[in-house]
């Protein structure tokens, strides 16, 4: 005998609405960040250019450089909101499926935000005001972004495991999990971390034997 599915509670509906709102904010901010990277940041991040060319761009376009990084800071906030609302939604469901993975994802998200925001603060302050000392500031920013991206990888893994738990608990088709995974990976892709090379030096002349 088939039993009718239990209707969602008011708390579950509210938590689901909060989760969907944070997901929409996530999509908008990451999409905008990718656009501003191409429009405003790429000349200062392009590793095919030498240090002097990239430093000149940062020095001559300080407003564009700062504005270009703002959507990335908002995208970090959207990541945090998704992690929080996902955990809250899971906790509102019977049995709390995927709660451990959602909690771990939130932890790694917080660990990623701290070095990332430090690095981006360096990029919009030190690199603009002290462009002559670009090497040291860029190294600190690069290391901060590298650490953050490592933690973001574990955050994504936590999201995927949570979605797997929700799929099994709610009886959803597996295609939803894979589509969600692809969307998360695409929108969480972050452009190449800024790496600064020294200006190209002319090759040393080869010693000729007499």
Image (cartoon, rainbow, N blue to C red):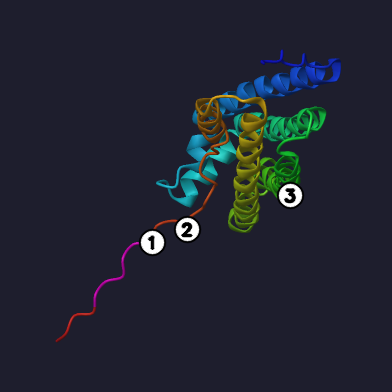
Q: Report which residue position mark 1 lands on.
A: 201
Q: Secondary structure at mark 1?
A: loop
Q: Is residue 203 magenta?
A: yes
Q: Front-most of 209 and 16? A: 16
Q: CA distance from mark 1 to mark 2?
A: 8 Å
Task: Look at the picture and state if 205 lies above or below 196.
Answer: below
User: Whole-percent x and y of residue 134?
Assistant: 60, 53
Magenta residues, as a range?
201-206
Q: Front-most of 140 and 13? A: 13
**Name of the residue lying farthest toward the front:** 1
Task: Look at the picture and state if 112 lies above or below 26.
Answer: below
Q: Secondary structure at mark 3?
A: helix
Q: Report which residue position mark 2 lands on.
A: 198
Which mark is in front, 1 or 2? 2
Q: Give the residue displayed 60% in from the left and 29% down from the top.
A: 64
Q: CA distance from mark 3 to mark 2?
A: 31 Å
């Amino acid at each position: 005998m088939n039993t009718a599915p239990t209707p969602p509670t008011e708390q579950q509906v509210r938590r689901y609405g909060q989760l969907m709102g944070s997901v929409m904010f996530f999509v908008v901010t990451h999409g905008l960040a990718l656009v501003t990277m191409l429009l405003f940041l790429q000349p200062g991040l392009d590793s095919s250019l030498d240090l002097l060319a990239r430093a000149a761009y940062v020095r001559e376009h300080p407003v564009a450089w700062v504005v270009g990084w703002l959507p990335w800071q908002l995208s970090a906030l959207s990541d945090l909101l998704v992690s929080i609302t996902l955990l809250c939604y899971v906790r509102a469901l019977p049995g709390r499926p995927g709660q451990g993975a959602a909690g771990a994802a939130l932890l790694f998200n917080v660990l990623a935000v701290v070095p990332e925001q430090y690095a981006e603060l360096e990029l919009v302050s030190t690199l603009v005001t002290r462009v002559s000392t670009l090497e040291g500031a860029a190294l600190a920013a690069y290391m901060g972004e590298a650490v953050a991206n490592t933690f973001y990888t574990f955050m994504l893994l936590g999201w995927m495991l949570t979605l797997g738990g929700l799929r099994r608990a709610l009886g959803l088709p597996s295609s939803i999990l894979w589509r969600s995974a692809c969307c998360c990976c695409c929108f969480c892709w972050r452009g190449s971390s800024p790496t600064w090379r020294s200006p190209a030096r002319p090759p040393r002349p080869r010693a000729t034997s007499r």
